[in-house]
Image (spheres, grey):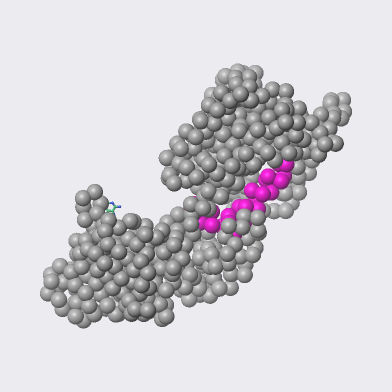
Amino acid sequence: MSDYILETKKLSKEFKGFTAVSAVNLKIQRGHIHALIGPNGAGKTTVFNLLTKFLIPTAGTIHFNGTDITGEKPADIALRGVIRSFQISAVFPNLTPRENVRLALQRKLGVSYHFWKSDSILKQLDGRAMELLEDVGLAEYAEEITGELAYGRKRALEIATTLALDPELMLLDEPTQGMGVEDVDKITALVKKVSANRTILMVEHNLKVVATLADRITVLQRGAILAEGPYAEVSQDPQVLEAYMGSAHD
Amino acid sequence: MNKKIWIALILLGLLAPFVVYPVFMMKLLCFALFASAFNLLLGYTGLLSFGHAAFFGGASYITGHLVKNSGLTPELGVLGGTLFAGLLGYLVGSLAIRRQGIYFAMVTLALAQIVYFVALKAPFTGGEDGLQGIPRGDLFGFIDLNQVYSVGGNPVALNLYYFVFVLFCLGFWIIHRTIHSPFGQVLKAIRENEPRAVSLGYKVERFKLMAFVLSAALSGMAGSMKSLVFQLASLTDVSWHTSGEVVLMTLLGGVGTVLGPLVGAFTVVTLQSELSSVGSWITVIIGVTFVICVLLFRRGVVGELGRLLKKSL
Ligand SMILES: Nc1ncnc2c1ncn2[C@@H]1O[C@H](COP(=O)(O)OP(=O)(O)O)[C@@H](O)[C@H]1O
Ligand SMILES: [Mg+2]
């Protein structure tokens, strides 16, 4: 198997003549935390939507573990082990955090179409669900109504749910967006912790987080790649400094 | 939900024909099952169908035809009607679930209108008159459903009543089980956040289609029961009024609650029978009741009650 878990070639997306993503060649090395950064509207979320097939590319190909997945459906991509989070927190608001996580665990049980069985057979998953909630510091909120949790906790729950599927490649879209400093530190530590044995591609605005976590960075601007490399290198690139970092740094 | 509530409801159902006018009670059971089946789709999957009369009415024609013209026993007639509705649900569902929101509702409405048209023109449906004089027949070939017993001096078809009651309990139990199954858990996830359910690897279209078929089949069962009770399958059963009525019952009682559709069906059926003397004003009265209820209890009667008691009813 190649060193690259994910590879895109000339990936492009047009919305009615407007090019949101333009000929992006992205290579994600296995085991890395790879950050995708760039100003608002650069096309980062659109790239995520293309990779998970929530949007259909106008052109280009996507290879995962050497297999062409360009033509697959979103659920198939998930079944391959590519699990995404969403920029706007994606939880099931009227269920409890325990049930949220359990929904991810449930798939492996192979009973999800069994409408004639009692849901008490899902109880066997509660132990694992609680472990995952524990990992993200939500154990004591396991039985609350998810919709009523604080924003930072919803994001943490989202990560726990994503982790429940033990994804080979995890896509995180701005996991620290809108959080206070304390929560940002917690999420940073959490991402670091869960990055063992898997690859993470994350969109992140907070450069401190990027500097702490990322092995490699891709800078996107107006849909195209502006620079790529390790943080130390990219952060010195004059083009990048001008386009993005210059204003964002202090 | 509380076991005591269930036992009380079952006792109530068993004793009802000795207290309440039995035909009214049977009509209520038919519509309560219909509304519960509809609620499985709207309340627990988040899909608003505006064509459920096609399943209710379609099955009532099929059952009527099977027992009247093919001489089948009533339980086979009901089974035939239910299967037919499930199959029709598969066809309608396959075409509709690709659409979202109001477009989904419009596709179901349009397809239901086709069923209405077929019911109007097909040779065996009796056109404007409907299918009349449907025999109730002998259950399993030996229990006469027409047999009446004297209850307080009034003749009551108890065999028929208990047959209808058992079918209702069966249908209601299937719905209850579905809601509280691993499958039901995924349905709730789809209702709550469809993209997230997809990103967890669930093929949501299959789940929606399965829920649609279940809901259609059970709506059909309700229609089949109705055709035996009233010995009539008519255009009203397949018309869009009936599709609208079931939406109304469900919203009135409380969408996404187990008991809501029962309360909604009870309210609407009672209003209809109590107010049958006022003629076409009934539509206005039910409409006004609906508006008041929606303004007062936004989650429906049972939904608001559940919120007060902090319980899921
Ligand atoms: N579904 C869509 N239809 C039309 N334009 C879109 C759509 N999604 C995104 N865009 C446009 O594509 C550009 C990139 O958006 P996005 O990927 O969300 O940026 P980022 O996540 O980098 O902030 C924006 O100009 C946005 O308006
Ligand atoms: Mg974005």
Per the picture, the main secondary structure of the magenta-coloured stretch is helix
Q: Residue at 61%, 24% (x, y): give it.
A: B123
Picture coordinates of residue B57, whole percent (x, y)? 61, 32
Asked if the stretch drawn in magenta spans residue B12, the answer is: no
Q: Is residue B206 left or right of residue B27?
A: left
> At 79% from the left edge and 40% from the top edge, which residue is drawn?
B14
Where is B17 relative to A60, above or below?
above
Snapshot quadrant of residue B226: top right
Residue at the (54%, 68%) spot, across then down = A108
- Where does the image place residue B199, in percent across and percent down from the top left? 43, 61
Is residue A172 visible in the rendered image? The answer is: no
In this view, A144 is above or below B34: below
Image coordinates for residue B22, horizontal then vertical, percent: 76, 31
Q: Give the answer, above or below, for where A144 lies relative to B40.
A: below
- Closest to the observer, A102 or A58: A58
Choose top left, top right, bottom left or bottom right for residue B162: top right
Taking the image as shown, residue B162 lies to the left or right of residue B38, namely right
Mark count: 0
Q: Quadrant of residue B248?
A: top right
Q: Is residue B172 magenta?
A: yes
For the point 84% across and 32% down, the residue is B144
Q: Is residue B53 left or right of residue A203?
A: right
Instruction: Please indicate, yes or no, whether residue A15 appears anywhere in the rendered image.
Output: yes
The magenta region covers B167-192
